[in-house]
Amino acid sequence: MTPVKNAGTRTVPTKLAALAAGVSEATIRQWATRGKLTRYGRPGRREYSLQELTALVARTAD
């Protein structure tokens, strides 16, 4: 079952998430598989929270 996003959650597709984080699309998918990012969307349409993504990038930059 895919998590339901909150009304205020801004999500973006994998390609834009990768651009925002400065990593490859494969890295975004790996982070989601490893539980570092929550995957939203329906089958064939993966989306990720920008807020969660920026927090993860900030933690990994330290």
Image: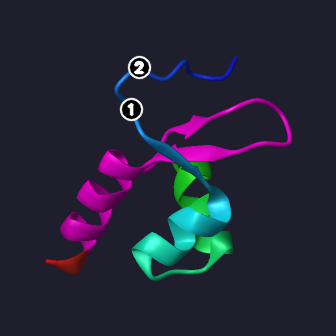
Quadrant of the rendering where the C terminus is positioned: bottom left
* Count of number-bearing discs: 2
Residue occupying image coordinates x 54% and y 18%: 4
Identify the residue under disc 2: 6
Residue occupying image coordinates x 52% and y 63%: 17
The location of residue 29, given as percent across then percent down, is 64, 59
Residue occupying image coordinates x 52% and y 58%: 31
The question of residue 47 being in magenta is answered with yes
The location of residue 61, given as percent across then percent down, is 21, 79
Residue occupying image coordinates x 76% and y 29%: 42
The location of residue 32, given as percent across then percent down, is 56, 50
The question of residue 50 being in magenta is answered with yes
Using the image, determine if residue 29 lies above or below residue 34: below
Which of the 4 quarters of the picture holds residue 18? bottom right
Q: Which residues are magenta?
A: 35-60
Identify the colour scheme used. rainbow
Identify the residue under disc 1: 9
